[in-house]
Amino acid sequence: MHARRAPFPHALRRPALSWGRLLNVVWATCLVVGLLLMANFGYGMWKGYSQGQHLNQVWKYQAGAARPASKAVNPSLKQPVDGVDFAIRVPKLDYYAAIKEGVDGGVLYASPGHYPATRWPGDPGTVGVAAHNVYWINFPQLAKGDEIDLETRYGLYRYRVTSTEIVNPDNRTALVTDSNGYHLTLTTCWPLWAGAFATQRYIIHTDQFWPVPVRPGYT
């Protein structure tokens, strides 16, 4: 006597077939989304780089060749022109970039940004510059004694690295505008590879060494 077969045998296999199709759809969707995200990121990198190169050309046209800082500076030169404040050069890293006014996402998308509440080069206190770690330099390569230059419309200012530190985003001691002396502080996200997901900040502190400050700054 033959064993009784289950009715509609093919119906029992349909759920497995449906799950397989569902997994294929999910996999294909994830692949497409991933490719779109990568393409968008690549386009953003290219666009940011292109805008940065354009800003560099605008700055060089505005400022001309770097020259020694003036002893008497016209205050009207310490303001943005077409959104650009001054430029930064890091000889050790062969890096050069125009610096815009502000540190919001629209500015840092394509260039370093000047913290608006901080000083201008040559003024006593601290010049603050922020950079997006995707488009900017590899900070950890800089060591104590390395030179960083700021080119302005009223002359060239040179700084030496004095120290570095890693801090949390809410730290209020890493960038002090009214710090005694003449300083430049650079900030970027940390770790470098984390991009927008970085949870800390990498800070580089420098002191101006040229022109030699004739005043002690704040006392």
Image (spheres, rainbow, N blue to C red):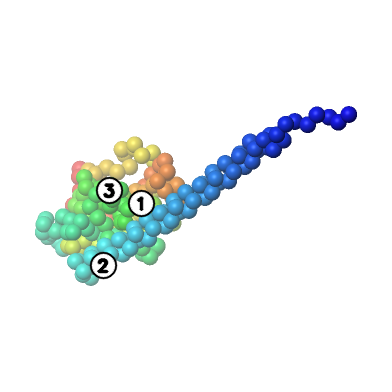
In the image, is 69 to the left or to the right of 172? left
Counting from the top left corner in percent of width and height, residue 89 is at 32, 62
Residue corresponding to mark 2:
57
Which sits in the foreground, 126 or 78?
78
Nearest to N terminus: mark 1 or mark 2: 2
Q: Are marks 1 and 2 in contact (CB under 8 Å)?
A: no
Residue corresponding to mark 1:
132
Q: CA distance from mark 1 to mark 3?
A: 9 Å
Label 1's element?
loop
Q: Residue furthest bottom?
A: 65
Label 2's element?
helix
The residue that appears at 63% across and 36% down in the rendered structure is 15
Q: Are marks 2 and 3 in contact (CB under 8 Å)?
A: no
Nearest to N terminus: mark 2 or mark 3: 2
Which sits in the foreground, 68 or 196?
196
Counting from the top left corner in percent of width and height, residue 16 is at 65, 38
> In terms of image quadrants, where is residue 218?
top left
Q: Which of the labelled discs sits on residue 103, or is there none?
A: 3
> In terms of image quadrants, where is residue 172?
top left
Instruction: Name which residue type carries label 3.
Output: Val
Within 10 Å of the Cα at label 3, are there few (<14), some (14-19), or many (20+) other Cα atoms?
Answer: many
